Amino acid sequence: MNITYLVDRLAETTPGAPAIWLAAGKCRSWAEVRARMDQLADALRDHGVGPGDRIGLLSTNRPEFLELLLAASRMGAVTVPFNYRLAPAELAYQIDHADLALCFVEDACRGSYDAAAPACPTEILESAAIDEWIACGALTPNMQDLPAGAPLGIFYTGGTTGLPKGVVLSHDNFLANAVNVTGRVPYGPADVHLHAAPLFHLADLGATFNALLVGGSHAFASQFRPPEILEQIQAHGVTAMLLAPTMIGMLVRDPAIATADTSSMRLLNYGGSPITDDLLREAMARLDCDFNQGFGQTEATQTITLLSAEDHRTALERPDLLRSCGRPIGSVAVRVVDGDDRPLPPGETGEIAVYGPTVMTGYWRQPEITAETLRGGWLHTGDIGLRDHDGLLRLVDRKKDMIVSGGENVYSTEVENALTDHPDILEAAVFAVPDKDLGERVHATLVLQPGKSLTLETVQGHCRAQIAGYKIPRSIAIADALPKTAAGKVQKADLRAAHWNRKDRNVA
Amino acid sequence: MNITYLVDRLAETTPGAPAIWLAAGKCRSWAEVRARMDQLADALRDHGVGPGDRIGLLSTNRPEFLELLLAASRMGAVTVPFNYRLAPAELAYQIDHADLALCFVEDACRGSYDAAAPACPTEILESAAIDEWIACGALTPNMQDLPAGAPLGIFYTGGTTGLPKGVVLSHDNFLANAVNVTGRVPYGPADVHLHAAPLFHLADLGATFNALLVGGSHAFASQFRPPEILEQIQAHGVTAMLLAPTMIGMLVRDPAIATADTSSMRLLNYGGSPITDDLLREAMARLDCDFNQGFGQTEATQTITLLSAEDHRTALERPDLLRSCGRPIGSVAVRVVDGDDRPLPPGETGEIAVYGPTVMTGYWRQPEITAETLRGGWLHTGDIGLRDHDGLLRLVDRKKDMIVSGGENVYSTEVENALTDHPDILEAAVFAVPDKDLGERVHATLVLQPGKSLTLETVQGHCRAQIAGYKIPRSIAIADALPKTAAGKVQKADLRAAHWNRKDRNVA
């Protein structure tokens, strides 16, 4: 089934209701959004795009991002959104790997796109340009019937091997996630969802379909800047957002909030990392709305467990709750398994494995890694945790050695590869250390070539050309050697231990 | 995935919480229910039952019905519940068609079972007998891993051809339905679901999994008798039931309700046919709880659309709402299609077609009818209706020519076949006429052999040996001829028209 039938449903039942909020208080209705989607789908088809073809999007948040996503899905094409903070080499790899038919690029992202110098045909992602495409399309129903499991998008995530993997998610995946989430978080047709976190990340892109399922409308903040967020909230009466905890901190601690009216806010969903009890207390007092924490990953169409609004209210008295990820959501089954994939009882630590209709169809053009990750029909998340005796899932560590810094996932291997490219660096171990603003920051312990020395600035300058800015180490340490096992494997746990105490980690 | 993982989740997180209410105020906990399920599954396996084997259940509502359903599902066997009101010939056909490995029969149903004289091995479905099975089973985790789409049960429904069809529903179907329903109807762990409608029908059996998903407990009324229902409500603080409108009428008009304390009731879900505004008003005033109407069919794991509690409150002022079936639920997509399966816009009448993860895998051993019913990936429900401009689905007629009498579905062809078996009956047309108590009753217009005459009693006596009591015509008319089309097809619409006025039908 093609998930864009949700747009038809809204266009038929509430044709005049607000759908997409534009600048200057203007608004498109569901009838208009459907018509534009069908026209844009037709124009794409006229341009030679067919079902299954990949269409790239490189853009900040804006209505045309959503319109392209809907139009591409409408005619069975596959959307591939890119992180505009990637370094040119990273972007070039992903664009090439996705084998795009076409890439839509916003003017603001043109610099990094041109630096990546991809070979694929390029189109402009600006209002006037998209309006021209739409004007060329026929206004006939253009919904492509799709078989079960048909892909809607490819979402690149960092990989343990250092190369990103493209997570293929289907129309059915997104619908199942939306049913799961809206069954637990009371979204409704009166909600106004502000796309405040980047739409190229699955978290906010997935929330798009939650709103489509129930009929909420969409507002856009081009990038996460607190004053712009507050402006949008007030301009459109925003009721719902999905943020990373870092963003919540930036928002409630921004001076502009003192005079802002945020009383329309009803639902603040966050994820990516746990929230501290201080920040939660401050944010709940200031925003006075329901907080929900989602834990998940791209491979599971984002949402695996939910720590509910009720849990958050309880957490004001029982802050240990905030160190859990909550309970499995809807149709998602969660197991903790040992090294032989045997399920473990509550209280025992192992890898978190997930089953259900939100699990990805696979990694794009990587059948071996797909088979390994989905062995036995279960998604092996790479996260290490336990289920406690209250049924709450608790994360203990990340098997994949991932750092979550300011809402972005950073894989240590990617950073280590960039570092050891430097002629003076012999070995590098990259890991997360606690950071007041970012939650975690990227830290590197380095072993240098005999007789060499390096400054933090030199190391950062070296990395800049190879990896995105948010992946670059914020601090370094120089050591004579790295702690290793007998088999020669670096023992990062020992390195990390010096930086963390129990209170910082979300350990049971 | 095996849906019995929901039992594990409850046994691990709330091991001591009430799960199954027994007579005399006793209660089994989730830890006990899981242990008994694993032991019973092991005992079944020891008895030679394997994954995919069919196990019949012929029983009124009782805890052991649920325990057998869970144990069979646990080890991958397929449960086939039978309607204990069937005539022996009907029961014999279904038991034979399902090709059972084993049939569990309650003593109270033994008479009709023996009259059907099936060839399959038989076991006793009574507390002591099931306890003996359980005592023989090993207490080890016995959950069979199952592939996507693995069958959980076969549910027989009447057929337009006169022969019943076995609807095969999977573990995934039931989980998807439970997620859909609990996303819209606020079931919770504190709910006590009373199995008041027969468990052999999919409506109540499906509700079992709703409760398992959220952790509610289960109480049982052996058959639908208002005094027993009221007793159970008071004994266990019942909060939720699923009933047919006829049953709601019987309940709130029973003298025993005058002195009964029903204040624990929170959710009354009903389906099978619309409710009249008089009855709704009376029932809402008396039971003072949320009413939800589900429209669906066995082929869609029951729930397709929902008329919500909020709609019911609105309906007190706008009773036309009660003539609709509400809005599509969760992951269910609904289309109205023309004779060539082309989708129709709102306001136009056609066949209701359904897509989503709750659609059956097919009819048991009937690949041709399965392919026809599921053509293009859509379930063709056989119901005729329209989507109105508020997004509400409205039923106009039933393509399948089905009568819903007192909550039971009766297919006119089955009744007509029984009638024309009588030597004096030349032709018969069976259809629904309105009935104050039953909602609809079975009516037959007959054309007799020249010179013959028949009384209602003779006709009913003739039918009794062939079809279940609820299918036997409650009234007959004798005619010289049946109205027919040029092609010779009986025009039932003309016959029906004389009995119905607009107010009776749930027509827009």
Image (cartoon, coloured by chain):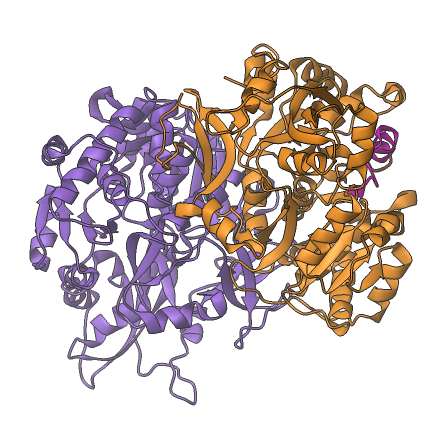
Chain colours: A purple, B orange
Asked if the stretch drawn in magenta spans residue B318, the answer is no
Q: Is residue A148 visible?
A: yes
Coordinates of residue B392 in the picture (x, y in percent) = 48, 24
Q: Position of residue B321 (x, y in %)?
A: 55, 17
Compared across the picture, whether A440 is left or right of B24 comes to left
Q: Is residue B439 above or below residue A361?
A: above
Point 54% across, 77% down: residue: A340
Magenta span contains residue B229? yes
Q: Which residues are magenta?
A: B219-234
Give the left or right position of residue B452, taking residue B434 as reference: right
Q: Measured along the vertical axis of the image, is residue B146 above or below residue A213?
A: below
Which quarter shows the N terminus of chain B?
bottom right
**Front-most of residues A222 and B1:** B1
Q: Residue at x 49, y 70 (%)?
A: A376
Furthest toward the front, the residue is B451
For the residue pair B9 and B210, the one nearer the viewer reads as B210
